Image (cartoon, rainbow, N blue to C red):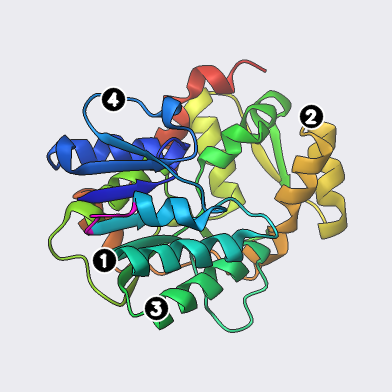
Amino acid sequence: MFAITGASGRLGRLTLDALLDRVDPAEVVAVTRTPGAVARAGRIRIRAADFAAPATLATAFKGVRRLLLISADRTPERLALHRAAVGAAVTAGVEHVIYTSVVRAADPGNPVPEARDHGRTEALLAASGLAHTVLRVNVWPDMFLLSGLARLAVAGGELPSSAGGGRVGYVSRADTGWACAALLAGADAPTGRVLDLTGPGLTDDDVAAALTEATGRTVRHRPVADHEVAGALTALGVPPALAAGWGENDPFRRAGWFDVPDDGTTRRLLGREPVALADFFTAHRAELLTG
C-alpha cells in the first residue's frame, strides 16, 4: 500500500489526486488528523493519526509499503514530531519512506531557520535503517498569494526587498504534489538519495517582471535595506507578522541559499518543464487584480 501523511493539507491533497491517477485507489492510505477533510473518501482508505500521538501512527502505517512523509509545519516541536513518525515507520515495517525537505537542508552553516529541523530529520532517516528518499523542495510561488504580497505588489506597482540579485528556483505546490506522487508510485525511487525539486533561478526583478506579464500592470522591484523590508511590506498592506517573516529570508536569498543547480530531476519527475512563474501568476490573474 501507498500512504500519505498530512493527506488533508494542501500538498497532501494535491499529491493524493496525482497518486490516484497512477495506482489502484484501494492501495492508497490517507493519513490525517482530520479524516472528514479528505476528498474521495469512498475510493481510498482513510486512517486517523497524529504525529503527536505515536501509537496512532504505528496503527496508521500498518501494511504500508511506501510512505510519503510530508513534513510538519514549523513549530518548536517539529523535530520531535518527525522523530515519532520515523519511529512509527520502523515499527510498522514500512519498506520505503519519501520525505519532503527543503533545499540545502543539511549544508554546513545553512542559516535559514526553516532548514534546521529538516536537516536533522534527514539525519534521523539516515540513522533509522529505513530505505528512504529525500525530496528537497525549493520555494513555492504559492506563498506570494497566501501572504497577499503578489496582489499588493500589483496594486502598489512595486515589490520591495533586500534580496538583491539572489536567485530562487521557484517550483509550484501543484508541481511538488505531482513529483511526490511520481516518487511514491514509481518503481525506481532512488534509495538513500537526496533529490532537488527546483525551477530556474529567478531574482526579484524577474518576479516583478512575471507579475507585470501576468497582469498587464507594471510592477517594479524596489531594493531596500534589510532593516527596511518589514516596514516597506507593511506599507504595502502585508500584515506586520507576515511582513517580518517574509523579510527574514531576504539576506539568505541574497546569499544564494535558494539558488540550486537544476540537474534535470524536476523535469524527470514531472515528465515536463515545471510551471513557469509568469504562467503560475497568469493562472491566478483574477486574484492578483482584486486589489
Q: CA distance from mark 1 to mark 3?
A: 11 Å
Region rendered in magenta: 61-65
* Residue indicated by mark 1: 96
Tags 1 and 4 touching, CB below 8 Å: no
Amino acid carrying label 1: it is: His
* Residue indicated by mark 2: 237
Q: Circle 3 — which element?
A: helix
* Residue indicated by mark 3: 128
* Residue indicated by mark 4: 40
Query: Would you say residue 105 is visible in this rendering?
Result: no
> Of discs 2 and 4, which sits in the foreground?
4
Amino acid carrying label 4: it is: Arg
Q: Position of residue 283 (x, y in %)?
A: 42, 26
Q: CA distance from mark 4 to mark 3?
A: 33 Å
Q: Of callouts 3 and 2, which one flags the residue occurring earlier in the amino acid sequence?
A: 3
Amino acid carrying label 3: it is: Ser
Question: In the rendered structure, does residue 62 fall within the stretch colored magenta?
Answer: yes
Q: Circle 1 — which element?
A: strand
Q: CA distance from mark 2 to mark 4?
A: 38 Å
Q: Position of residue 32 (x, y in %)?
A: 44, 40
Q: Residue at x 39, y 29 (%)?
A: 38
Q: Residue at x 81, y 49 (%)?
A: 229
Question: In the rendered structure, does residue 141 fall within the stretch colored magenta?
Answer: no
Q: Position of residue 225 (x, y in %)?
A: 83, 57
Q: Is residue 181 above or below residue 69?
A: above
